[in-house]
Amino acid sequence: MRKFLICLCLLAVLPCARAQFGSFGDIPVEITADGNTRFEEGVAIAEDNVQIHYGKYSIFSDYAEYNPETRDILLIGNVRLYTPDQVLTSQRGLFNLETKQMRSLEISGSQYPYYFRAFNFRAVSPKEFHIRDATLTTHDSSKPDFHVRPRSIRFYPDSRVILTNSTLYVGQTPVFWFPYLFANLNTNGFQFLPGYDSRWGAYLLTSYSFPVVKGVTGDFRLEDRFKFGPSVGLDLDMNYGKENRSYGKLRSDYVFETKDVTTVQAPGEPAETKTTNRYRVAFQQRLFLTDDIYGTANINVLSDVDFLEDFYPREFALDPQPDNSLSLTKWDEVYTLSLIGRWQLNDFQDVTERKPEFVFDFKQQPFFGLPVQYDGTTGVASLRRAFSNTPSFGETTYPDYAATRFDTFHQWSLPTKFWNWLSVTPKVGIRGTAYSQSGSFASPQGDATAIDPITGTITTINNSGAAENPINDPSSALTTKGAVFRPVANYGLTISTKMSRAFEQIQSRWLGLDGVRHVIEPYLNYSGVYNMGPSPENIYQFDRVVQSTQLQPLDFPQFTAIDSIDTWNITRLGVGQRLQTRRNNATYQWFTLNTFMDVNMDNPYSDAPVSNVFNVIQFSPVPWTSLGIASQTPIQNQGFTEFNTTISFMPTRDLRFSVGSRYIDGNDFFADNSQLNFYAYWRINDHWSISTYEQYEFVSKVMQYQRYFINRDLTSWVASVGAEVRDNSGGDQEYGFLLMMTLKDAPQLTLPLTISQGPSQEPASASQ
């Protein structure tokens, strides 16, 4: 409704003739009529099928008058306003081009997702509108399923709407009366979500949004989970500054736990019972001080390690250990300056603290006008590895360690092309890293110990030379070895080329092919590093290699594990292939395949002479089907196997489904896993549809997750009944049930009359 009122406001400034219907302002006005056009006492008059064209707007009426002295324009009979977004109709309208005031009778129109009618409309100013005897609905029908009739509406664009003496009708039957309704145009009003979950029990989640000051809205939440007790929350959303580039969000929760609650931290780990009050405070912000200087904040304070998993499992799945950091960044086309701070605000998390760190990044640029390219980075940081004070079951609490680190890196490269088809880029770099402290762990048994550069945990090497990881002796002492300096040289060579051939004779409407071009891009990336200082085992590990099934970057500065750098000689061989076709007057990637592997002449992070062979496939022949495969397979005994596959298919307009698989076997750091997930949606007819999602684990032979929904289309509403079952493979089974009503034109109905726009989404599960 907001846009249609703004469009009416624009009508007030439509230049509608001076003298012989000339122009007003910089945009010409064209007015024609089938009947007479004349002047009577200084007033211009047009009759019969009057047409007014102004820019992208067009107005039609039976009769029009324009007074050039008062700047009033009067439209009578079958008034129609055509804008780029909508069509408005009225029977009578009076507009003043000077004061921007307007009046209109019997006006109607639409603005997604609203349809409206009003007997009387008046614009006091371009920023305030009064409407009387209106009808609002989201049902596109002459007899809508539901509508609201407010006696009066006061509308303030980009601000708020106030409705008085409103009645909600289902059909033509009044069901509820609201003496006063207030809606902020940028908030969601009142929401409530009842449901049942086996972990929470019965629950009711309610919230109400309200304006605080300009650019700041609040959201007050009152929630009750039967097995956990009541909780309150307050959220603030902020948008401010130039063009609203700066933004922030505060989220806070306090849970009054009045009952004993048994939770499972992870499958196979012991249950914990908590009866204390629990809380969460989270604050994220990006603040632009100038166009090129901005600060960011990410603060997350939690009462305990289980809070997110217990109350917000979706957030926990995405980020189980939220960070705590502040940064200030100066951006330039040539360089970036960053000041970073990071702290362990939650003592149950492992954190590398930066108190603070200053980094200067120089982007790749020509070196003093030569064809040589230069890039580099220099940083100084006060670092502390802060281990968790409440380690997971079966692990040891390690003593913290700290050091001041100065690191500087400089690299030169020479992009070259031979014979106009072979790209060759040699590169060479130098790095120097100084630590105020270094050291290792000394075991009481006299065994050699070190900090593992891959995991960051402590490894013990016993007298027989066998590794025991991790060390389980809390009495092990951290020894320091004083300041150290480590110089490192890197060198490399990248070679690539491209070949292509077109096959115009390949044509297939069913496969979406209008000619085919096959592109082959073989490439080689050799990377060498020579460590001229102490090995990582004798350096405190702050920025270290992270456990992953993927290959590490070979180039700098993309390889960011500064403290784990050691001598290596690795060659990455690969070939990319693409099948391209024409579609919609553009080149379309019909099929892509990237195959690559590493040859480890010397790799400190792997004992295997060669890595797995990786294949990444994307296949999208037509809009209604796609296939994605990311796989790696071993070519010698020391590797492991991993397949991640997803296929989606929509054979008819009423049926779509997708199948995905996750498989990993033989990895040293990740447990064997073979998982299959399936999603399907079937629109049975115009009124009924069903959807399902299932996830099965073949190793444990457990159906880990099931979700089922039945949906009933009620013309302008969709009623959904859903259930879910979750098996924690060692923990308790969880059950959920949800009954939900959803507007087809919007994913969420809220009161006061505010509707969050957007495409309808699949109903969320009850436990989320």
Image (cartoon, helix red, strand yellow):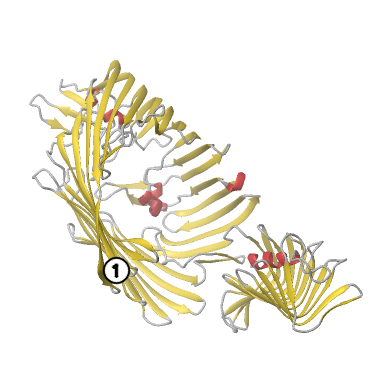
The residue sitting at 90% across, 72% down in the picture is 42
* Left or right, residue 198 beside residue 46: left
Q: Nearer the viewer, residue 179 or 158?
A: 158
Pointer 1 local density, CA inside 10 Å: few below 14, some 14–19, many at least 20: some
Q: Position of residue 394 (x, y in %)?
A: 23, 39
Q: Is residue 525 left or right of residue 10?
A: left
Q: Quadrant of the N terminus?
A: bottom right
Residue in the picture at 39% in, 54% down: 314
**Residue 644 drawn at (x, y percent):** 24, 56
Q: Is residue 498 above or below residue 142?
A: above
Q: Quadrant of residue 751?
A: bottom right
Can residue 759 be seen? yes
User: Is residue 601 rendered to the left or right of residue 92?
Assistant: left
Q: Nearer the viewer, residue 72 or 300?
A: 72
Badge 1 amino acid? Leu
User: Is 576 drawn above or below residue 367 in the view shown?
Assistant: below
The structure residue drawn at horizontal position 28% and vertical position 44%, both measured from the top left corner, is 420
Residue bearing the label numbered 1: 513
Q: Tell me the element at label 1.
A: strand
The total number of labels drawn is 1
Residue 18, placed above or below residue 608: below
Return the x and y of residue 659 as percentages of the image width and height.
Answer: 26, 65
Across and down, in percent, residue 418 comes to 25, 40
- Write down the quadrant of residue 470 in the picture: top left
